[in-house]
Image: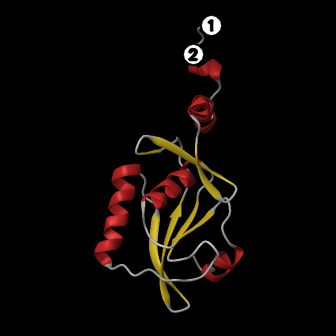
Amino acid sequence: MDNLTALIRHGEGESVEFKEQWNEHGLEAVASFVNTKGGTLLIGIKDNGTVLGWGGGDRDLQIIINQIVEILGVHPAISIQKEQSKPIVVIEVKPGPTLVSCRGRYFHRVGNSTREIPPDQLGPYFVTKLGVQWDSVTNGYS
């Protein structure tokens, strides 16, 4: 990400999320990006764009990577970049071909927030994400 400063200045949105530190909500944000249009999660940034920096080390970064891979089954691009001389974890996520769950729950981006997909919308959401129509799902049966 060459324009980290501009990304932070622009603020959170459908494809950008800030987290002060890594936690369960970070996993949910990554899942929501996969399930929507992709996006970037920045760890070490307050919601208002204040740069705090990330205080973790190599072991902490490996924990983040392992959680994303093992819990979500996705492989985003992860790097540490400097902003105001402070390290920021940058997690870039591409949209997935199907929905991914985070501990049995499905999330998507709505504006600048991560929201759980309501159970009654999961069926149509899967069909839309896969790019198929209900007729093809039923294999011609009425």
Which residue is identified by label 2?
Answer: 138
Q: Say which residue appears at 56% left-offset and 55% top-offset.
A: 33
Drawn side of residue 134 relative to residue 20, left or right: right
Residue 106 x %, y %: 51, 43
Residue 101 x %, y %: 46, 43
* Marks 2,1: beta carbons within 8 A: yes
The residue carrying pointer 1 sits among few (fewer than 14), some (14 to 19) or many (20 or more) residues within 10 Å by Cα, namely: few
Identify whether 139 is placed above or below 99: above
Which residue is identified by label 1?
Answer: 142
Q: Secondary structure at mark 1?
A: loop
Question: Residue 51 or 140: which is nearer the viewer?
Answer: 51
Among the 4 quarters of the image, the one containing residue 46: bottom right
Among the 4 quarters of the image, the one containing residue 15: bottom right
Q: Secondary structure at mark 2?
A: loop
Q: Amino acid at mark 1?
A: Ser
Alpha carbons under labels 2 and 1: distance apart: 7 Å
Q: Which mark is residue 126?
A: none
Residue 133 x %, y %: 65, 26
Task: Tell me the quadrant of the picture where the N terminus can be found.
Answer: bottom right
Q: Amino acid at mark 2?
A: Thr
> In the orientation shown, which residue stands out farthest toward the left?
59
Q: Say which residue appears at 43% left-offset and 53% top-offset.
A: 74
